Amino acid sequence: MNWQVYIILCTDDTLYTGITVDVARRFSQHGDKQGAKYFRGRQPKQLVYVETGHDRSTASKREIVIKKLPRLEKFRLLASEINKVGDFPL
C-alpha cells in the first residue's frame, strides 16, 4: 500500500503532521473532528505538504522525524522538490 506523510496548516497557524493512505479522506475527517484530538480546538486550513512512496513503517518513521523539526525547517520542507501537494487536490 502507498502511504503518504502530510502536513496541514491549521487556522491557528500551527502545522499538523500525519500519515495516511488517502490524504483527501483524512483531511475531510480532520475537518469533521474525527480522528486526531489535535483538531478539537482548531480547524484544518490547507494541505501544504505531501510526501509519497512509503510503506506503513517508513511513513511512521518519517512522521516522527518531521514532527521533531523546528518550525523553520518544516517550512523549508514545504518549499522542497519532494513536496507532492499539487498531486492531491482537495
Image (tube, rainbow, N blue to C red):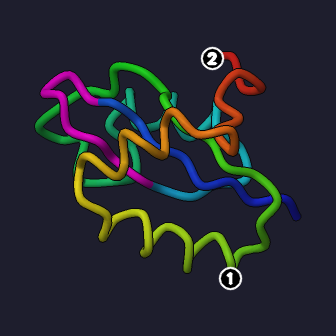
- In the rendered image, residue 16, in percent from the top left (x then y), is placed at 33, 47
Location of the C terminus by quadrant is top right
Tell me if residue 44 comes above or below residue 89 in the rendering. below
- Residue at (72%, 26%) from the top-left corner? 88
Pointer 1 local density, CA inside 10 Å: few below 14, some 14–19, many at least 20: few
Query: Spatial distance from mark 1 to mark 2, Cα to Cα?
Result: 26 Å
Tell me if residue 8 comes above or below residue 45 in the rendering. below
Location of the N terminus by quadrant is bottom right
Amino acid type, mark 2: Leu
Residue 43 in magenta stretch: no
> Which range of residues does the magenta coloring cover?
10-17
- Residue at (68%, 82%) from the top-left corner? 57
* SS category of the residue bearing label 1: helix
- Residue at (71%, 43%) from the top-left corner? 22
**Along the horizontal axis of the image, is 22 left or right of 7?**
right
The residue that label 2 is drawn on is: 90
The residue that label 1 is drawn on is: 57
Q: Quadrant of residue 2?
A: bottom right
